[in-house]
Amino acid sequence: MVKSPRSKGDPMNFIIFDLEWNAATKKHHVSEIFEIAAIKVKEVDGMLVIGDSFHSFVRPMFHITDRTKRLTQVKVPDTWLAKRFPQVYKKFLKWIGKEDFVLCSWGPDDKREFMRNCELHHLQTDLMNKHLDFQKIVSDLAGLAKGQQIGLLTAVAWAGLPFEGVHHSALDDARNTANLFVHVYKNLSLRGKWLEIDAKSKRGRPDHAFEQEYCNQVKLLMHRRISLQLDRKQFASRCGLSTKSIMKIEQLKRVATAEELQQIQRTLDELEENPAAVEQDQKKIQVS
């Protein structure tokens, strides 16, 4: 528990939520949510307390893509037995209850996809009127430049906390985000029903240890790509990122998200385990 900086007013309730969704395709333009998880964080006698949790799979209307399966490690039978989004939505609202709350997520994407799924099923989106992008706040606290965002795995490590469970499991990501929320809450000030960075908190360059660790990680990944004799364009097509993104990440012109680093790592692992795929790419270059 962390002492709340708030001294007056009613206790505040935060719903730290995380979603996993199926990647949109040319045929199906909506990224269907297939997992919803949330953790309640409450103020009790001026202290922050992590409360109960919500977790439910959602049965999507369309098949989950292979790329989504690899990224999230979702087991399709879990979604077969689940209810459709409207039923899970109502269950989620009931779990939240009637107390005043602020919804918090790691980045703006969860809010956007939740609202899109609500619109797809003709459901109200009012609960997202009070939403906090916690990733943006932590990125500022870590001293990242404007427009740069820190990934969840990196942020948890930056805070000196252990990451519990598996990344891209909605419940594990929500739990780790809640732990991080409680940890950094002492650096935040509560104004009305919204959180803002405390003017007294340190700004500017990232912590040196965090910066050096990130640079070393990117340098190692770049050397692994070069050792495979793959140029940036080839590698970008393999890992699903743009060539420009790979270039900026390797040149340290922007901070990669934890998801991007994980995708780069996974792609390198697959290519190193399957040299034939690399040789195939090299032959394509020679033919062209």
Image (spheres, helix red, strand yellow):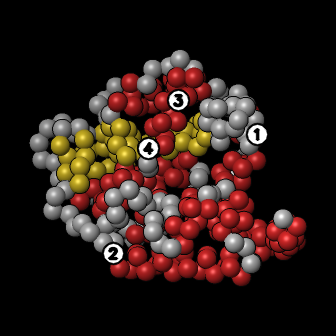
Q: Secondary structure at mark 4?
A: loop
Q: Position of residue 270 (x, y in %)?
A: 76, 68
**Whole-Å distance between the Cαs marked 1 and 2?**
43 Å
Q: Secondary structure at mark 2?
A: loop
Residue that badge 3 annotates: 116
Amino acid type, label 3: Arg
Residue that badge 4 annotates: 108
Residue nearest the observer in this picture, 208 or 16:
208
Mark sitting earlier along the chain (2/4): 4
Q: Is residue 231 left or right of residue 99?
A: right
Amino acid type, label 2: Asp
Does residue 277 show up?
A: no
Residue nearest the observer in this picture, 184 or 63:
63
Relative height, residue 167 to residue 275 (above, below) = above
**Whole-Å distance between the Cαs marked 2 and 4?**
25 Å
Relative height, residue 175 to residue 25 (above, below) = below
